[in-house]
Image: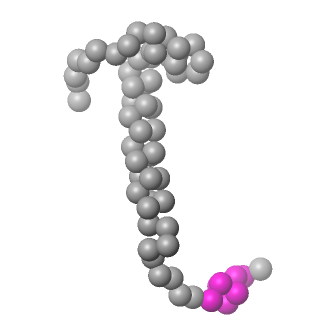
Amino acid sequence: MRTNIEIDQKVIDEILEKTNIKTKREAVDLALKEFLRMIKLKELSELAGKVNWSGDLDAMRTD
């Protein structure tokens, strides 16, 4: 999808300087994916202690 957005040039310059990323597009794509990953991790951590699991880990082990 093509879109036009205003991005802080200092932030983009710093990202390009500190990484192997070569283009603004690649930097924005990576930032959006990383943001989504962080959201999913937060959602996952909110499940801690809310899921009941039953099973026998010793029986499942093959080593």
Residue depicted at x 43% and y 31%: 31
Q: Is residue 45 above or below residue 18?
A: below
Residue depicted at x 44% and y 53%: 42
Q: What is the count of numbered marks?
A: 0
Q: Which residues are magenta?
A: 56-62
Residue depicted at x 44% and y 74%: 50
Instruction: Locate the C terminus by quadrant.
Output: bottom right
Residue 40 coordinates in the image, percent (x, y):
41, 52
Near-viewer residue (62 or 4): 4
Determine whether, in the image, residue 22 is placed left or right of residue 61: left
Near-viewer residue (11 or 25): 11
Residue 4 drawn in magenta: no
Q: How is the image coloured?
A: one colour
Instruction: Locate the N terminus by quadrant.
Output: top left
Near-viewer residue (34 or 2): 34
Residue 52 coordinates in the image, percent (x, y):
47, 81
Determine whether, in the image, residue 33 is placed left or right of residue 4: right
Residue depicted at x 70% and y 87%: 58
